[in-house]
DNA sequence: TTTCAATTTATACTTAGGGTATAAAAATCG
DNA sequence: CGATTTTTATACCCTAAGTATAAATTGAAA
């Protein structure tokens, strides 16, 4: 991603968190980011589009943190799941961004609406599949029902707790912990008699909305090669080595998925604090998604 | 309430439902309501204030429908509770208004925020106390926890179902039914080991926010007398009789609460379809609230 | 180092919408 | 009827989103 674009996104994100979306004007954003109006509109068609970019960035951050957290862990470990869920709240720092996203549910901008729906569905898909990891295949039929209700409870709890602003505010982990306990009870009950709202038809209708665009391997390799070319001897040696390895491994016909996973995490960390951090992160995400796509296709 | 004000509120409500809050301009509202800009600003300080009025009207409609529904029914009947809960969704016709209310969560207008919080707390209070009606005193400690989670699940379910727009959309009753089944499971679990988010401190912090203004009996009597004076022999005889009875009963030192309840319902219905409908309705609500206040004070 | 295309900047402009101000007309009420 | 309040019509102000454009800057290729 472009340097300017990042500049703008970060300024905008901070302003949105501090003052809210509506109370932040384009002028605010461009003067904080030290760019001109023209540049802003070169990168974003509108203020909403800028918000969508932030939403996407935030999501990517969440996804990659969750991947890292699950690395080399037992997928059925309930505590890991709880921590993973809580990450979303952490990433939306200080909860202010969540409020913004919530506040856009009723928005009439079609693009924005679609973006929000996409993110919600992605979250549901992820959680439903993780619930199956934790509770076993037996809950497959009710996994979406439970995912929906879990997210609903978490959101509402956070809302009420924020509203009350009690002295000792509950951490996201505590909230998720209690809610997952409720989910536990619901699952136990549902395994006996299923009264479900989120039926297979509903899920299918949702999936039709999301059609993730496929990641093309060539484009990915090109991106990675370009990244490598731009590295200099000043850059961390380990990072260069990881990059070369990733390139080699992805070039081969049959990737070693698990090894790639491990390397990716190290690759990502090795550029932390350098000027390449952002791009390295972006590349990690893309590869992670690529691997995930592969895995899905095998099924 | 004033005739003009009603005119404006109804035009605005319809427009908000049809086009959304942001996409409805003041011009739209006043031209639909056939009033001038000056009149609009005579009644509402701003567009937001108009929205708050709609919110309040909607709430009153909900509250009174619920009262009517519970009349002479067993308070511990779970089906009645389900129907009562679903009323909120019905009143916010076609769900469009709900979206609007949701979309204001992140709003920065302090008055609007307060209004929304007040309504949410009122809903929580109501539901928590109804859960005790249904499940008994044993659930008092967890009643708010359950109320919060129930509302969270309902909202989220409706959101997802709306998003999916499956062919056979679930009715609000079905949604509430399934969610209450989940709540049932949660209660069962919680009665053994309580892991609660919505602690007494949180609840107390909430209550501090709401401080309902007391209803003064004199003002109420005056309003009712004024209403009676404006009735003519053309108006339904039953309605006149009910009004006189209410006046007499409220004037006595010790009101017969249960009888008043029954009469109120009849009073309300007898003016339906007449030009006094709106005011009669308004008066009913006030008296209901007054009675409710009395009952609370006795505790 | 020069050159040429793309990007960025500064600035001025358009448009939409919320809200204010005010004088004249209409409705309401004692 | 006369006085007071409400309503109307109209003009105006301000903010903020988005457009347009010419001049300046950047950056990479030659």
Image (cartoon, coloured by chain):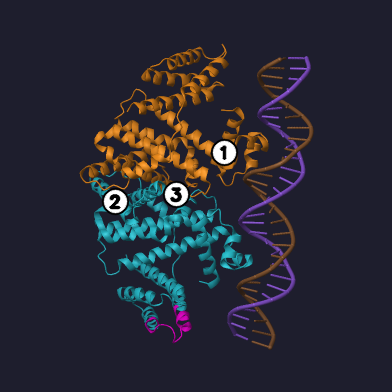
Chain colours: A orange, B cyan, C purple, D brown
Residue nearest the viewer, comparing B167 with B212: B167
Count of numbered circles on the image: 3
The residue located at (56%, 57%) in the rendering is B24
| Quarter occupied by residue C29 | bottom right
Q: Which residues are magenta?
A: B224-239
Q: Which residue is mark 1?
A: A50
User: Few, some or many C-alpha atoms within 10 Å of disc 1 (few <14, some 14-19, many ≥20)?
Assistant: many
The residue located at (57%, 62%) in the rendering is B29
Label 3 lies in what chain?
A
Is residue B298 shown to the viewer in this render? no
User: Few, some or many C-alpha atoms within 10 Å of disc 3 (few <14, some 14-19, many ≥20)?
Assistant: some
Q: Are marks 1 and 3 in contact (CB under 8 Å)?
A: no
The residue located at (38%, 33%) in the rendering is A84
Q: Which residue is mark 2?
A: B178
Chief secondary structure of the magenta portion: helix
Instruction: Residue B11: give x, y in percent of width and height.
Output: 53, 64
Q: Which residue is mark 3?
A: A163
Whether residue B144 appears in magenta in the rendering, the answer is no
Q: Is residue B247 above or below residue A221?
A: below
- In what element is the residue under mark 3? helix
Residue nearest the viewer, comparing A209 with A150: A209
Question: Where is the C terminus of chain B found, in terms of image quarters?
Answer: bottom left
């Amino acid at each position: 991603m472009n340097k300017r674009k990042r500049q703008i996104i970060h300024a905008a994100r901070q302003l949105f968190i501090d003052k809210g979306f509506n109370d932040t004007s384009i002028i605010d954003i461009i003067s904080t980011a030290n760019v001109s109006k023209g540049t802003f509109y070169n990168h974003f068609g509108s203020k909403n589009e800028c918000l969508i970019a932030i939403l996407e960035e935030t999501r990517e951050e969440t996804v990659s943190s969750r991947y890292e957290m699950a690395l080399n862990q037992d997928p059925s470990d309930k505590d890991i799941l709880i921590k993973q869920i809580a990450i979303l709240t952490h990433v939306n720092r200080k909860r202010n961004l969540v409020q913004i996203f919530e506040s856009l549910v009723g928005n009439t901008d079609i693009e924005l609406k679609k973006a929000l729906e996409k993110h919600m569905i992605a979250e549901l898909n992820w959680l439903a599949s993780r619930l199956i990891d934790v509770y076993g295949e037996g809950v497959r039929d009710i996994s979406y029902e439970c995912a929906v209700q879990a997210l609903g409870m978490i959101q509402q709890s956070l809302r009420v707790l924020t509203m009350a602003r009690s002295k000792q505010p509950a951490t996201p982990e505590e909230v998720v912990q209690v809610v997952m306990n409720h989910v536990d009870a619901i699952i136990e009950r549902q395994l006996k008699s299923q009264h479900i709202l989120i039926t297979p038809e509903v899920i299918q209708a949702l999936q039709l909305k999301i059609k993730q665009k496929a990641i093309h391997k060539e484009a990915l390799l090109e991106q990675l090669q370009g990244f490598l070319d731009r590295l200099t001897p000043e850059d961390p040696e380990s990072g260069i080595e990881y990059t070369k390895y990733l390139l080699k491994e992805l070039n081969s016909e049959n990737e070693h998925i698990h090894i790639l996973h491990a390397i990716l995490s190290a690759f990502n960390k090795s550029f932390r604090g350098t000027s390449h951090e952002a791009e390295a992160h972006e590349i990690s995400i893309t590869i992670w998604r690529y691997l995930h796509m592969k895995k899905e296709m095998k099924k």
